Amino acid sequence: MQNRTNMTVHANEFMESHAKIPEIKFIKLFINGEFVDALSGKRFESIDPRTEEVIANIAEGDKEDIDLAVKAAREAFDLGPWPRLPGRERRRIMLKFADLIDENLEELAALDTIDAGKLYNMNKILDIPGAAETIRYFAGAADKIHGETLKMSRELQAYTLSEPVGVVGHIIPWNFPSTMFAMKVGPSLAAGCTVVVKPAEQTPLSALFYAHLAKRAGIPNGVLNVVTGYGHTAGAAITSHMDIDMVSFTGSTEVGRLVMQAAASSNLKPVSLELGGKSPFIVFDDVDVDKVADLALQGILFNKGEICVAGSRVFVQQGIYDKFIIKLAEKAKTWVVGDPFHPNVRQGPQVDKKQYEKILSYIDIGKKEGATLLYGGKPYDRKGYYIEPTIFVNVTDDMTIAKEEIFGPVMSVLKFKSVEEVIKRANGTKYGLAAGIMTDNLNTANTVSRSIRAGVVWINCYFAFDNDLPYGGYKMSGFGRDCGLESLHKYLQVKSVATPIYNSPWL
Ligand code: ADP
């Protein structure tokens, strides 16, 4: 089914692709500048979600491999050049790293497609160049890290130093393997930290490729280590490690809790947690229905709904509710599902079988609890983890699909009357990651944006990410920010230095 650009395509017509997949070059752990097997010799299978077939057997790191990686990172931090380099040197090396990412764009894009089922074209225009740009953004900060001179109330001269926090463990999820890698590694390297990265077991390929590029760029051995493996083994070994100074984690709220517990019961390392969400996308009566229905659909279907800020609860004001849901259904019909290598496809397979089954079970629950299925709701009868874009209407706040994070292409539409009501209902969730507010009324936008308890609020747009925009959660969506200079600061700690101005008798 090729070359259908000008035809109306229905979502349930599947688009095939015959793209050539890349050769997998890196399958081993990257520790102290070398690719090595896991000490146990074990491997785990990386599965292509398009075909359910094995793409590669990847080294399965465990506690003892994490120990080796931490030892390398510790030595590189305590004795090596990286934290001691002038900032401009770290900047130069990181800029080279970013250039190498750009040079290898197509290969990296293809790796994230076969690993995560992400759209190849989107990886080429967004994820991979975005990762390079994030590394550049933080490279530019590497030589602008300063403390403060303090005006003291006694006869003391004092200042603060901004020092790197030390060895950082990064545990990253599978939905944006490249973006997450850059968002975590970029600021921590710029700060002068050394790192141990554990990519998600579903998507280990691009992280290993980035490790290879980092070495080529001149990042010294031991500064950047990548240990592939499972969360409950390799991941848990990071969170409880006595020689890791900080953990930055993005993933589910349940695992976030485990990360915090392990940090508390080991060396009290600080943690930064970016967790789940059930974000409200609020549509007021005064909007352009056509335009906003498009945005609402993208808000839940982008990256097949596997995005923590997905606008999964769409609140629509009663005056336009009926018109809006008709538009949503019309537009969902043109949303093309298929092989993510095909240029016309907008939605590929879910990342793995577990996620696929979880989403389908939520769809069942939605039906059983009485929500009206407006569109989709079925898996594709073929190999691969493909699910139709799915829209439930007449959803009520107490339904499971309105409360729990589904992390899939499943929208819940809810009706509301007033501003006060929607603020209360939008905040009626344990999460607080993001919110969208669609209105031309400035007063409404101001009132709602200030009343929503979420880390990011988008007004008349959605997914407006930027390296400058700090990003993270309120409530059980976590704490700590990625992106923005806030994220650089989380990898720095403040040392206060004081000295007498003259020989004061009481000092
Ligand atoms: P999801 O449920 O969406 O797969 P997770 O929160 O389980 O998301 O996974 C996010 C990351 O956390 C992955 O890299 C995973 O391997 C890791 N992880 C899972 N369990 C643990 C754990 N107990 N300790 C540390 N990391 C973990």
Image: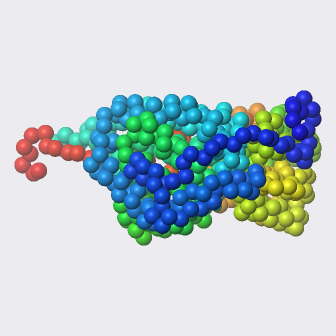
Q: Residue at x 75, y 63 (%)?
A: 358
Task: Pick whichever, 3 or 498, lies toward us.
Answer: 3
Q: Residue at x 60, y 65 (%)?
A: 254
Q: Is residue 485 above or below residue 202?
A: above
Task: Pick whichever, 278 or 75, lies toward us.
Answer: 75
Q: Residue at x 54, y 35 (%)?
A: 101
Q: Position of residue 163 (x, y in %)?
A: 32, 45
Q: Residue at x 20, y 45 (%)?
A: 498
Q: Is residue 27 above or below residue 470?
A: below
Q: Is residue 376 above or below residue 266?
A: above
Answer with left or right where residue 390 lies relative to residue 120: right
Q: Position of residue 145 (x, y in %)?
A: 36, 36
Task: Pick whichever, 147 or 83, lies toward us.
Answer: 83
Q: Can residue 232 be spotted in the picture?
A: yes
Answer with left or right where residue 362 lies relative to residue 25: right
Q: Position of residue 317 (x, y in %)?
A: 84, 46
Q: How is the image coloured?
A: rainbow
Which residue of the protein is positioned furthest toward the bottom in this rendering? Answer: 265
Q: Can residue 296 be spotted in the picture?
A: no
The quadrant of the image that shows the N terminus is top right
Tell me which image quadrant ligand 1 sits in: bottom right
Q: Is residue 42 above or below residue 195?
A: below
Answer with left or right where residue 270 lies relative to residue 453: left
Q: Position of residue 218 (x, y in %)?
A: 39, 37
State which quadrant residue 202 falls in. bottom right
Q: How many marks?
A: 0
